[in-house]
Amino acid sequence: MTRLSRGRFITIEGGEGAGKSTNAEVVRSVLERYGFGVLATREPGGTPLAEEIRSVLLGPRDEAVDPMAETMLIFAARAQHVARVIEPALRAGRWVLCERFTDSTFAYQAGGRGVAAEAVAKLAELAHPGLWPDLTLYLDAAPDAAMTRISTRSLDRFERERRDFFDRVREAYAVRARERPQIVRIDANRDLASVQREIVRAVEGFLSVHGKA
Ligand code: TMP
């Protein structure tokens, strides 16, 4: 009997308005073209409970939210998402494509809010022991251009942050990208066609090494 091979875990990261959802569609279509079954999901969210936590996290509120409370809510959602959706799918041989994961927490809660990166790493080990993305596509966009793209929508609690918050988020992503070879930085300041060409190249490059059983 042949054992079903485990799927791969791919994440898409980036700041506000970097084009994660549009480009996730590109990644999905490349994977499907190569015959992989894909489960597309997002964070915070991905299960009914985790989506409820997302609403709690994103809704604007008068009460100042403590950075550690925010971090723990994110990891509560993540633990549920990993246990109920991500791990079962990977075990069943499906490829999981997730918009945002723990690199977002290093960027936003450690970089943006000032939570210790060591605390984020410890919570990550508790919430998803041994599970890290096999490939992360990091869409790097300058905060100014990205904020213009989202300025027509009504803003959530994160999008209302000031410019210096997003500069710290971007810097923390840059640090993470230097530390983890699984992170591929894509310059998202260019036109969509160029960004998408580079994404296709990155995914095909990954498949040529990791796409076999
Ligand atoms: P999205 O709208 O880009 O999906 O993300 C929702 C917001 O949640 C976004 O502003 C970033 C924030 N976020 C964190 O601060 N930390 C995290 O770990 C995740 C997953 C999201």
Image: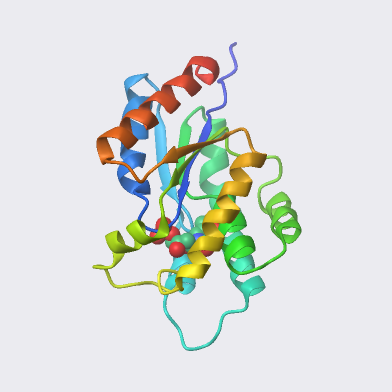
From where the camera sits, is residue 87 visible? Answer: yes
Question: Can you give x and y, in whole percent of width and height, for residue 146 in the image?
Answer: 35, 57
Count the marks.
0
Quadrant location, the N terminus: top right
The residue under the point 47% across, 88% down is 62
Front residue (pair 141, 205): 141
Depth order, front residue of 33/3: 33
**Res 40 → quadrant:** top left
Residue 152 located left or right of residue 45: left
Q: How is the image coloured?
A: rainbow
Q: Taking 11 as reference, is 114 left or right? A: right
Does residue 42 sit above or below 91 in this rendering? below
Q: Is residue 78 visible?
A: no
Residue at image coords 42%, 76%: 59
Residue at horizontal 60 percent and vertical 54 percent from the top: 172
The extreme top residue here reads: 1
- In this picture, is 24 found above or below 30? below
Percent coordinates x, y for residue 11 in the rendering: 49, 41
Task: Looking at this view, name the residue that lies furthest to the bottom.
Answer: 62
What is the quadrant of the C terminus in the image? top right
Name the spot of residue 47 as percent of width and height, x first: 46, 55
Q: Residue at x 59, y 71 (%)?
A: 70
Identify the image quadrant of residue 3.
Answer: top right
Q: Position of residue 138 (x, y in %)?
A: 48, 43
Say above or below: 200 vs 186: above
